[in-house]
Amino acid sequence: MTEQSAALVWALGIVGWLIIRWPYRRRAKRTETVADNSSIGERVSLGLTILGLVLLPIAHLTTGVFSFANVAYSPLAGWFGMLTMSGFLIIFYLSHKHLARNWSVTLEIRKDHKLVDTGIYKRTRHPMYTSFWLWGFAQFLLIPNWIAGLAGLASVAWLYFSRIEHEEAMMRSQFGEAYEAYCERSYRLLPKIFL
Ligand code: SAH
């Protein structure tokens, strides 16, 4: 795979992300929220994620602004990047499908919010965040640049670590024992296979 094709695969991943999210985003806007736990800090983190995963790579790919920080490209990295990007899209799609109306961009509890612990959520509590980590890795494999390539992973790390405890605390206070039991059956990012 050439370096240009790798960049194209990255761009197609972004298009896939938009296509998958679009209908859920529209539906989420129409779904009532009963508890909004979002904060300014969380919105800043979400903005940083868009910067790292979308805007900086686009700036680099279109203008070469970070060329001084280029890394040698390897076709093997390109193929692995394509595999990782595909994994991102599949897991991202499945987590939206299973969360359905319970999904929100920021930390919120919906009207009639259900605890989802089936499908891709059965043994993993945060598959959507798993998919974001994969997106970050794919970006570095597909865009061989220390700044534009690694910005995705850096922003995903920031979002994940600043949010995870708050999200679980919110779920615990909403669902109590049921969430405790769910935590016993699952891991955060990887499936708890051996119970
Ligand atoms: N952390 C999850 C979901 C991200 S979307 C993941 O990575 O897959 C964030 C919203 O999803 C939160 O506001 C919360 O209301 C909701 N949520 C998270 N886990 C949930 C679950 N198991 N069941 C229902 N809603 C959940």
Image (spheres, helix red, strand yellow):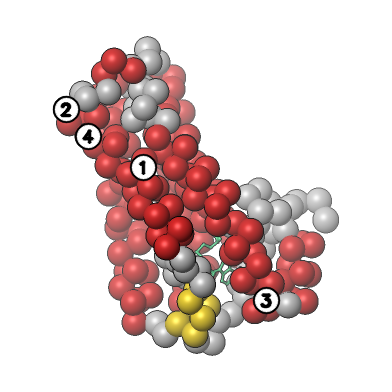
Residue 7 seen in the figure: yes
Disc 1 marks which amino acid? Leu
Q: Is residue 76 left or right of residue 148?
A: right
Image quadrant of residue 151?
A: top left
Relative to 132, say whether 56 is above or below: above
Relative to 102, say whether 82 is above or below: above
User: For the view shown, which residue lies furthest in the right direction?
Assistant: 195
Q: Nearer the viewer, mark 1 or mark 3?
A: 3
Q: Which mark is residue 173?
A: 3
Q: Is residue 168 left or right of residue 32?
A: right
Q: Quadrant of the C terminus?
A: bottom right
Q: Residues within 10 Å of mark 2 (few under 14, many from 20)?
A: few
Q: Which mark is residue 93?
A: none
Disc 4 marks which amino acid? Ala
Q: CA distance from mark 1 to mark 2?
A: 17 Å
Question: Which SS class for mark 2?
Answer: helix
Q: Of marks 3 and 4, which one's residue comes earlier in the chain?
A: 4
Q: CA distance from mark 2 to mark 3?
A: 48 Å
Residue assigned mark 4: 59
Q: CA distance from mark 3 to mark 4?
A: 42 Å
Disc 3 marks which amino acid? Ser
Residue assigned mark 2: 63
Q: Which mark is residue 53?
A: 1
Disc 2 marks which amino acid? Thr
Label 1 residue near ligand 1, CB within 8 Å: no
Residue under the image location 59 percent in, 64 percent down: 167
